[in-house]
Image (cartoon, grey):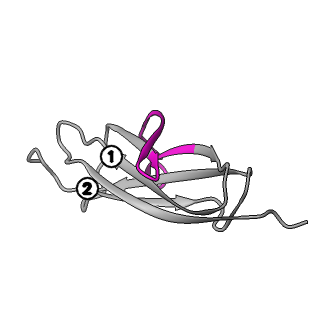
Amino acid sequence: MPPGELTNTRVSSSENPSSYRGSVTFAAAVNDRAGDTLGGTVQFAVDGTNYGGSASVSTNHDTGATTATVSYTFQGYGNYTITANYSGDSSFLASSGDVTVNVIEAPK
């Protein structure tokens, strides 16, 4: 495979809308067109500010999905943009994706 294979990063949220002060898990799914196993890391960011350290991607060999996850607790209401920045590796180019999450008051 030639170096510099294009990748795609998609971000999903375990809850959207999410509850204020509720824990949410974000998953970044990274793939290329051929479904190869990718290496590298994902750095998550909330509204442009990095959150936590880089998370290593891992591939589920049963499904072929390459993902990285992080948990986050929102401390305010409103809309937030969660971005996942995939680092790439020696064979795959970096890519990024994002999702907008609406944080609301938890139902009583």
Task: Give, as a three-letter code, the residue at label 1.
Answer: Tyr
Residue 81 in the figure: left or right of residue 97: right
Q: Secondary structure at mark 2?
A: loop
| Residue 10 screen position, x and y as percent | 41, 61
Identity of the residue drawn at 81% across and 62% down: 106
Residue extent of the magenta highlight: 45-70
Disc 2 target residue: 7
Task: Give, as a three-letter code, the residue at label 2.
Answer: Thr
Mark closer to the observer (1, 2)? 1
| Residue 35 screen position, x and y as percent | 31, 57
Q: Are marks 1 and 2 in contact (CB under 8 Å)?
A: yes
Q: Is residue 12 above or below residue 5?
A: below
Magenta stretch: dominant secondary structure: strand
Residue 71 in the figure: left or right of residue 3: right
Measure the C-alpha gap from mark 1 to mark 2: 9 Å
**Residue at the far left in the pictured view:** 2
Residue 46 in the figure: left or right of residue 10: right
Disc 1 target residue: 86
State whether residue 37 appears in this view.
yes
**Residue at the far top in the pictured view:** 53
How many neighbours does mark 1 have within 10 angstroms: few (below 14), some (14-19), or many (20 or more)?
many
| Residue 103 screen position, x and y as percent | 66, 63
State whether residue 65 appears in this view.
no
| Residue 19 screen position, x and y as percent | 73, 60
